[in-house]
Amino acid sequence: MSKYYNSKRKNNIFEPESKEPFKLSRSRLELFLECPRCFYLDRRLGIERPGGFPFSLNNAVDLLLKKEFDAHRVKGLRHPLMEKYNIEAVPFEHEDLKKWQNTKVGIQFLYKPANFIVFGGIDDIWINSNKELHIVDYKATSKTSEVTIDEDWQISYKRQMEIYQWLFKMNNFKVSDIGYFVYCNGRTDREAFDKKIEFDIKVIPYKGNSSWIEKALKDAYLCLKNNVLPEPSDDCDFCSYREEAAKME
């Protein structure tokens, strides 16, 4: 069996009768919004979607950006990108930052109406002169056109930002509605590879709106509590594949 696919997981399965808080990651809430059936199969029945190969290059960009911003963090200085985009902020220093950046731990909040411990691992945080936090997310791609966050499929990026903003607000931090995407675009217009990839880096501001989150959490809870498999989303490729494959079988 492929190491990228486990047909049945034993850990962190929702038990309807349990009184213990259930840990729900930011990515699993996104899965619910994408397709309630896939979410139910995953968190209630322990059958997850087949995973893809890890994005090692993206992870390398992520790690190097964190090192770069950390170098300015310890000095309390603005990064050149902040100066270029006239962002009056510096990287935020906090004793829990490394924990918040850990995707297995992240920033957490117990949402009592659903008894969910909602959590997510952030990339970075900046703080402005008004002592407001700006949530920062790193993205990497390679395309010839200008990078934006305006494509329909990038709604997941925006929701990701909004959940992080909500989590920090719920933890009593003063959080700006403006977050930033640090978008790295690998250039392909060079004459040769020469053992390196050059990136154009663009900082894209985004004004978040977290008003949808609590309803989504309540709906996700009702989905898991139900003993009936929910209907799939119309545009879920995984459910469409399972349906067509079952017909052939």
Image (cartoon, grey):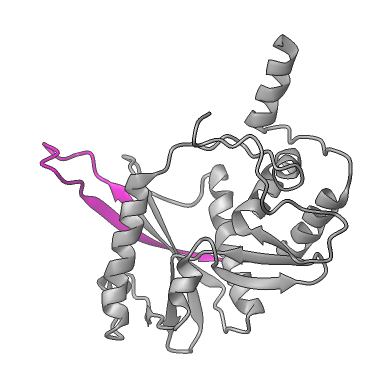
Of residues 181 and 146, which is closer to you in this image? 181
Of 116 and 136, nearer the camera is 116
Can residue 77 be seen at all in this image of the molecule? yes
Q: Position of residue 227 (x, y in %)?
A: 89, 43
Classify residue 240 as left or right of residue 197: right
Q: Is residue 211 something one can see in this rendering?
A: no
Residue at 36% across / 49% down in the picture? 58
Q: Quadrant of residue 85?
A: bottom left
Residue at 25%, 51% (x, y): give it: 199
Q: Is residue 115 left or right of residue 32?
A: right
Tally the numbered discs.
0
Q: Is residue 79 shown in magenta? A: no
Above or below, 161 against 133 in this view is above
Magenta includes 191?
yes
Task: Answer with left or right where residue 96 lies relative to residue 75.
Answer: right
Q: Is residue 36 above or below residue 164?
A: above
- Residue 231 location, x and y as percent? 81, 35
**Which residue is drawn at the image coordinates 28% and 78% (left, top)?**
72
Residues in magenta, as a range: 184-210
Q: In the picture shown, does residue 221 fall above or below 127?
A: above
State which quarter of the image contains the C terminus: top right
Q: Nearer the viewer, residue 28 or 192?
A: 28
- In the image: residue 84, left or right of residue 115: left
x and y, in percent, of residue 143 in the image: 34, 40
Q: Position of residue 248 (x, y in %)?
A: 70, 10
- View extreme (top): residue: 248
